[in-house]
Image (cartoon, rainbow, N blue to C red):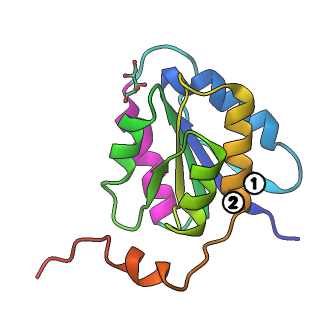
Amino acid sequence: MERKKIVIASDHAGYFLKEKIKKFLAGDKYELKDLGCCSDETVDYPDFGHALARAVAAGEYELGISICGTGNGINMTVNKHPGIRSALCWNEEISRLARAHNDANICALPGRFISESEAYLIVRTFLTTDFEGGRHQPRIGKISLKLY
Ligand code: RB5
């Protein structure tokens, strides 16, 4: 079975949770690429968010996971990239709906506001839920701004 290609990145506020998620996802199911950061030393979340968004938008990875303290900064950053639909996910149901209804391709986690076990549920749900299509397809088609 082909392994799903996943990419993950965080700032310092998400560093420890990122390391735990990497262990949680370790195994045969996913091929996981870590784009940093590499310690809990202060960094700027856009530096890691942009790298993650570029990798997903280029089609190198199917889905991405991003983490900062609130999830907001890195979520705002990645959503600047065409082709990225990133959803701030703070519980399992939001995560499920982000995939099923919004076809989100990046899951943004608020590392300072969710527990380790909540993060695992959110991530597992995000990676295993399919987009429902149907009525949601034209809606996501209207998200991107077209320049006339
Ligand atoms: C870092 O202190 C914090 O501001 C950052 O992780 C994030 O929460 C920003 O949105």
Q: Position of residue 49 (x, y in %)?
A: 42, 42
Looking at the image, residue 126 sits to the left or right of residue 54; the answer is right
Give the CA distance from mark 2 to mark 1.
Answer: 5 Å
| Residue 61 visible in rendering | no
Q: Residue 79: which quarter of the image?
A: bottom left
Judging depth in this view, the residue of 2 and 67 nearest the camera is 67
Which quarter of the rendering shows the C terminus? Answer: bottom left
- Taking the image as four quarters, which one is ligand 1 found in? top left
Q: Position of residue 68 (x, y in %)?
A: 47, 30
Give amino acid for label 1.
Answer: Glu
The residue at 60%/68% (across/down) is: 100
Q: What secondary structure is found at the residue carrying circle 1?
A: strand
Amino acid identity at mark 2: Lys
Crowdedness near tag 2: few (<14), some (14–19) or many (≥20) residues, C-alpha within 10 Å: some
- Prevailing secondary structure class for the magenta stretch in the rendered image: helix
In this rendering, the answer to whether 51 lies above or below 55 is above
The residues colored magenta run 44-57
Residue contact at pointers 2 and 1, CB within 8 angstroms: yes
On screen, residue 68 above or below 137: above
In the image, which disc is placed on residue 31?
A: 1
Q: Earlier in the sequence, mark 2 or mark 1?
A: 2
- Residue depicted at x 47% and y 52%: 87
